[in-house]
Amino acid sequence: MSGRRVFLDGKAVTLAEQPLKGGGQAAVFPVEGDAGIVVKIYRDPPGPDQERRLARMLTMSPLAARPTDANQPPELAWPTAMARGTNGEFLGYAMRRFGEPRHVQLVGLFTRVQRLKLFPDRADWRFLLGVAWNLAFMTARMHHDNLVIGDFSSSNVVVDGNGFVTFLDCDSIAFTDPATGELFPCLMHTTDYSAPERQAGGPATRQSDDFALAVLVYQLLTAGNHPFGGVPHESTSESTVKDNIAASISYVVRPEMVIIPRGTVDPSVLPPELLTLARAAFGPGVQTPTARPQAEAWLRALDKERGQVRSCTVRPLHTYGSHLPTCPWCTRASVTGHDVFNGPRPAQVPGTPPTPDQPPSPYAGLKVLGVVLAVIMLIVILANLG
Amino acid sequence: MHSEYPPTLPAEYADIEFENNAQRMPLVLCLDTSSSMAGAPIQALNTALAEWTRELHDDVSLSYSVEVAVVTFGGQSVGAWRGPHLLDPRTPTSPFIPAHAFQAPQLTAAGVTLMTEALELSMHIVAARKAELRASGLQYYRPQVCLVTDGLPTDPTGHLTDSWQRLIPVLAEEQRSRRFRLYAIGVGGITDRGEQVLQAFAPKFNARLQGFPFRELLQMMSASANAEQKGAGDEVFEKIFSQFKTQRPAWEA
């Protein structure tokens, strides 16, 4: 059984009956006979503001003028056509499809079971660092193009097997129409990534993006730990990430304030310069937006580390920053029995050293290519930002 | 931090708790397995549970933080399931399992409808889990409890009882304090009287559905959990629920 018919720039298409994904606000449908696109249909009839926004976006092509190789997907799932009903009413829009299994929500990198399932043999710390670099690059480029992401979270960014990222919910991006001066604000946000001023109802800004970026980069570099996790001591009410953000309670800056879950990765796995940025973002930067490191600062600091990542000789998928004398993941595994990057292994007799069984890296060539591309991109971005 | 509940994690799951510090989203399915559900309805429920489990495993966002417990009321009693295993009522083991490790139980239908006791057990395991999470430093979103029934509350001898009325003030207070969100869903041949009980339990989030649309019901629970993760306002949950209630495809809303 088929779903409804809609018109994309006047061309009739039939949507699948079941959406891929439905939220409170909209649902995303595959298109019959065209695996390359999806159509986002709003649940409530979208108003004239949203229609004007989409019409304006269709005339823009942000981030288009940057070099990419053929393997790299676009960084934005930008609208490609208006979707209208039989009477011409505005219903939603079409965009390129970035679906599983090739594209996975960023949150898929935050648990070991999903990392091993979705990115087998590659989702090590070096990979996570590369994804963080790509996120910072994307954010810096969007800010350079006067776009504010607004609703920036681990659910609306997808990542592919090469670590490239694509931002999905472009219809909520905040921007000012250069022709008319009309401001299109971002009305959505995700509380676990919302700076206090956004939780309080303030508008999306570059600084609120910088806050969300800091949280995402921190999560990537600690294999999934939220910097505002942990239950405050002596708290009586229900405690959430949102509450800790509002109260500026991060264990990265003030570990004495909270009960830290025993599985939490120590912030010291971040190289010193990145840890300094994190402490600025999760300390003074929580209440003072201008104190937050900007995307460009993250990009520069991440870039320095990319060429210096060390590989563990004992266990596979163990890579770490050059500031550490020994593998932090092996240390953690020996202390807690939990290996962040490798699945449970058969029980070992206490005292016996782990068996070395690291496979040769199949990505050595890709890594070289990645470094070369990184350097080219950095030159381009520094030129643009400078 | 002191907790009146002992830590309850069996060794085979210790590794899972270590995974990360994600804010958890406890979800309880409180399911009627009394005799009226025997035959096709319970089969439909088992099939839907198995499908939903697969969807849950594949949903990277939900599997990051959702943890599932199943409570059943049927036979001669109520029971809590830890995945596919029915727990001994005396065990301190928590029935909650991280979504990615959850396996659906194989349910059978018979016996009486101890709906009141099942809701009380659901509230108890939620409170215990919350205390356990807090003591470990783990945060949680507002838990969801989904009651599904096709009948009326009975006593252990199978006779209709009004004892469920003792729950009304308790549930009202729990909802007001936002301790969890209760959905009360009537299916199959549930009567007007049965529907009134559900309305009293969950004034906003109750529904009376034709047939046994368990798959849609479980998908609604996932959509609602997603909204909770996003930090959505109450109006979003009401919208998701009203779309589910009318049983129309999402795009017709």
Image: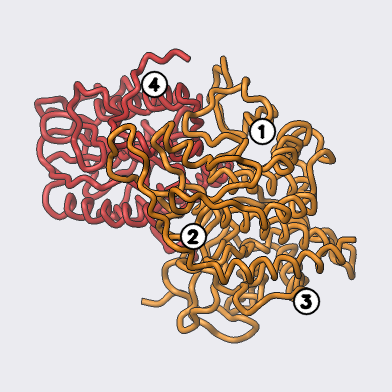
Chain colours: A orange, B red
Q: Give the amino acid type for the residue marked by disc 3 in the picture.
A: Thr
Real-space Cα separation, disc 1 to disc 3, in angstroms: 37 Å
Subunit ID for the residue under disc 2: A
> Which residue position holds label 3?
A59
Quadrant containing the N terminus of chain A in the rendered view: bottom left
Q: Is residue B211 placed above or below B179 in the rendered structure?
A: below
Q: Are marks 2 and 1 on the same chain?
A: yes
Element under label 4?
helix
Which is nearer the N-term, disc 3 or disc 2? 3
Q: Is residue B157 left or right of residue B207?
A: left
Of discs 1 and 4, which sits in the foreground? 1
Point out residue A256 in the picture as x, y percentages from the top left corner: 62, 20
Element under label 3?
loop
Looking at the rendering, which quadrant does residue B3 occupy?
A: top left
Point out residue A95 in the picture as x, y percentages from the top left corner: 61, 73
Real-space Cα separation, disc 2 to disc 4, in angstroms: 51 Å
The local crowd at label 4, few if under 14, some if 14 to 19, many if 20 or more residues have their Cα within 10 Å, is some
Of discs 2 and 4, which sits in the foreground? 2
Point out residue B215 in the picture as x, y percentages from the top left corner: 32, 55
Which is nearer the N-term, disc 2 or disc 1? 2
Element under label 1?
helix
Q: Is residue A124 placed above or below A344 in the rendered structure?
A: below
Q: Are marks 1 and 4 on the same chain?
A: no
> Which residue position holds label 4?
B170
